[in-house]
Image (cartoon, helix red, strand yellow):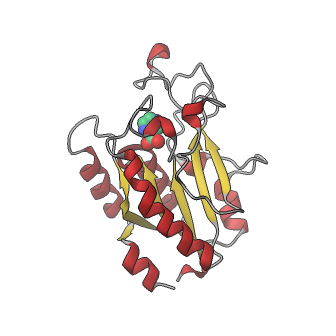
Amino acid sequence: MLRRGALLVVDVQLDFCPGGALAVPEGDQVVPPLNRYLELFKQSSAPVFASRDWHPAQSKHFKEQGGIWPPHCVQGSAGAEFHPGLLLPEGTIVISKGMSSWDNGYSALQGVTENGTPFAMLLRRMEMDRLYVGGLATDYCVKESVLEALKEGFAVTVLTDAIRGVEVEPGDSERALQEMWGAGAEQATFASVRGDL
Ligand code: VGL
């Protein structure tokens, strides 16, 4: 099952962790479970993708320009770095998103590699048919990435032990999960994904 499956780690960046500009409650707690998945995928030679919010300093995504968020994950800033505890294996493909001044950049499927290749195109070229998704935040970038991947025809497994939500409104994460299940996403935790090998 993992043969054509890839791991997508969404936005585990310092600004989304406690102390960051747009801290997700317990955001850093996705790091230990994600490291277990990263090791598993590395051992099975399955591709690993890590998306990052990579905004320009001026963005309509930010409050100052009409958006709803404090500035965060500005290109090249310390807060845009991946959490240093995240053990991304050699060969991890970084997907940047939200790079234009008008783009919220919630979905990793709208992102591009460092060579500018659209992520969805790359997944097709690599003949991937399933994405295993964990990271931040359940109710924004994880949700939008999952929904768009499903729309693009990929199967999606949400790693429920490796996600956390922003929860602008209490219950947002739960509602996001229901939306993902309704759209056809599956859920798994570490034991069952390991069993897929
Ligand atoms: C995100 C809120 C604003 C996320 C990004 O990564 O889920 N959330 N920008």
Q: Is residue 50 left or right of residue 127?
A: left
Residue 129 appearing in the image? no
Q: Residue at x 60, y 21 (%)?
A: 57
Image point 50% across, 29% down: which residue? 72
Q: Quadrant of residue 122?
A: bottom right
Of residues 186 and 88, the one drawn nearer to the viewer in this rendering: 88
Is 160 located above or below residue 81 in the figure? below
Q: Position of residue 69 (x, y in %)?
A: 42, 26
Q: Is residue 38 left or right of residue 172?
A: right
Q: Residue at x 35, y 58 (%)?
A: 180
Residue 54 or residue 149, whichever sits in front: 54
Using residue 58 as the reference point, say whether residue 37 is left or right of it: left
Q: Is residue 21 visible?
A: yes
The percent position of residue 95, horizontal first and vertical second, equals 64, 49
Hey, which residue is sitting farthest front in the picture? 85
Residue found at the very far right of the displayed protein:
115
Residue 55: percent from left, percent from top: 60, 30
Q: Residue at x 59, y 28 (%)?
A: 74
Q: Nearer the viewer, residue 109 or 196?
A: 196
Q: Is residue 29 left or right of residue 81?
A: left
Query: Tag count in the figure?
Result: 0
Q: Position of residue 58 (x, y in %)?
A: 59, 19
| Ligand 1 location (quadrant) | top left
- Residue 75 quadrant: top right
